[in-house]
Amino acid sequence: MKKSTIASLVALAFSPSAFAAETAIQTEDVIVTASRVAQPRESVIADVTVINREEIERAGQSTFIELLQTQPGVEIASSGGAGKISSVFLRGTSATQVIVLIDGIRVGAATTGQTTFENIPLAQIEKIEILRGPASSLYGQDAIGGVIQIFTKKGEGKPHFYAAVGYGSYDTKTAEAGVNGKLNDTRFALNLSSSDSDGFSAKHIKTGAQADDDGYRNLAVSGSLSHQIAEGHEIGVQLLSSEGHSAYDSSNTFKNTIDLSQLSYSLFSKNQFTSNWKSTLRLGEGIDGQDNQFSPTSHGAFKTKQRQYSWQNDIGLPLGTLTLLYDRLEQRIISATNPYKKTDRDTDGFLVGYLADIGDHSVQATLRSDHSSQYGTNNTGGIGYGYKINPNWRTTASYGKAFKAPTFNDLYFAFSGGFPFNNPNLKAEKSENFEASLRYEDNQRDASVTLFQNKINNFIALAPSFLPINVDAKIQGITLAGAQRWDSWELKGSADIQSPHDETNDTTLARRANRHGSLNLNYQWNDWRFGSELVASSLRYNDAANQFKLGGYAVLNLIANYKINSDLSLQGRLNNALDKNYALTSSASIFGVNDPAYNTPGANLFVSVRWEPSAK
């Protein structure tokens, strides 16, 4: 990476006319994921982004991963549109190196190690926090790239109902409704959502079964109930269930389908025992299931469970907060079409953390030890420091270690015919990450530049024979982010320049770009709000050997929102306004160079109406 390029990009990031500040709502956000302790945004050392409810609603019928794609450090891959197999790469790491939490509970398949991003409904989400960088010292195994935490809608203010409906291209229909609020010492929420789309052909194929449209439908429900039994003592339960059915392209003689199910629930007790001792006890499960119909007589299914227990104690000290945490993760394969040699493993984690703001200085330190029934003991730690140079400028630096355990598929998976796709000799991935940032913020603008290097030993990759193997990888990069607000205008954007490198084979990690970014421009005029989004990426390779290319692309989306009255609003969204033909992934590396890439949506329009009275 040329020094002159970095210097010019840094200068652009801090130019008052280039980017600038996020909305006041975002600036005032309290962030939990960065330390497992609630912090004001301006005190956070880690590299974190918050997506609030307003941004989620502006996403329209966009999928969860399409919304993530507009955020710093995030790349995606999708095999043919909504409901199709999708991956999220955070700072160039793998989708299996990112932990996804729903209200503090892990979700994802213990077999593949990956979350079913394509089946997470945006309509159920209130807020998303994205923590970039190693977080195993906070959350245990797998958090080499970071953590994405989803917060579902909760009860606040006086009880109120809301509802929304939408219709768009590909005969896409959506509906959502709910009620939430607070009565005396009890908070409650119940939210329902559905979506149904005919979709489009997942592959560039004009004949046979793969030429038809590959639709997707989803039905989801979330809810929460909590009660303050005494001052400082609250108990509660929360739940999210998502059921999806998707058609996809694999056989040219049979319409392949997959049923997807995700369930996350937890019970919790929050107790303020003394003025300086807060305890949170949580028990929950994340359950993931898939059933693939390969042919009229053949299918493949699995269902896994991740049960979690945690007891967190936050103790206020004369300077800062001490956190003592016990975590237990029990991973189980409940059922599977193909047998696994091993179907369970347990991990006990112990964490000591310290967090403090001392004048203009911020300090964060964590030390964690995880003891697994399968892969032994792994110790991780992290340390971070922030310094407020003046009221507007702040610098941070941090170092952290992380690890990822091989999945059940990595170690034991084989097709029913006995052909192996496993390697029982795999070692756990281990990483060391260094990063530093410089941040600026005032009432009208903010900007940041973050430099990082993540060295990953025993990185799990696929050999040409499709067996998982250990290699060494190094990911270096710079993230520029910022926003500017003036009068009725808002400009917000980010750019990532990175080198996601397989050092063992001297190749670029598959489906990662060296450059990607997004730009968002909004204008408020009376009761109208107009917006545009530009998402762009440079060339990527579809395979680990770098033989098959995926071309660069730039996609433009346009949004208009009209507030009819205080309770009712109308939104129109034109995605891929220039009808760009591009691909996020292909099966060429598996079936040959002539195998077609997976389709992405062409120009498509979606219109929705939302009714939501104020909760105040």
Image (spheres, rainbow, N blue to C red):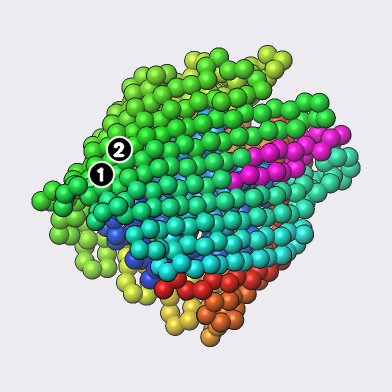
The secondary structure type at the circle numbered 2 is strand
Q: Quadrant of residue 23?
A: bottom left
Q: Residue at x 73, y 54 (%)?
A: 197
Residue to which mark 2 is pinned: 311
Q: Residue at x 41, y 34 (%)?
A: 308
Q: CA distance from mark 1 to mark 2?
A: 7 Å
Q: Is residue 495 left or right of residue 325?
A: right
Q: Residue 282 placed where, x, y %?
A: 36, 40
Residue 529 appears in the picture as rendered: no
Which of the marked residues, 1 or 2, is nearer the chain's N terminus? 1
Of residues 154 and 137, the one drawn nearer to the viewer in this rendering: 154
Q: Are marks 1 and 2 in contact (CB under 8 Å)?
A: yes
Magenta segment, which residues? 242-260
- Amino acid under label 1? Ser
Mark 2, Cα crowd under 10 Å, few <14 / some 14-19 / many 20+, is some
Residue to which mark 1 is pinned: 279
Q: Residue 6 placed where, x, y %?
A: 41, 55
Q: Residue 329 placed where, x, y %?
A: 40, 30
Of residues 278 and 81, the one drawn nearer to the viewer in this rendering: 278
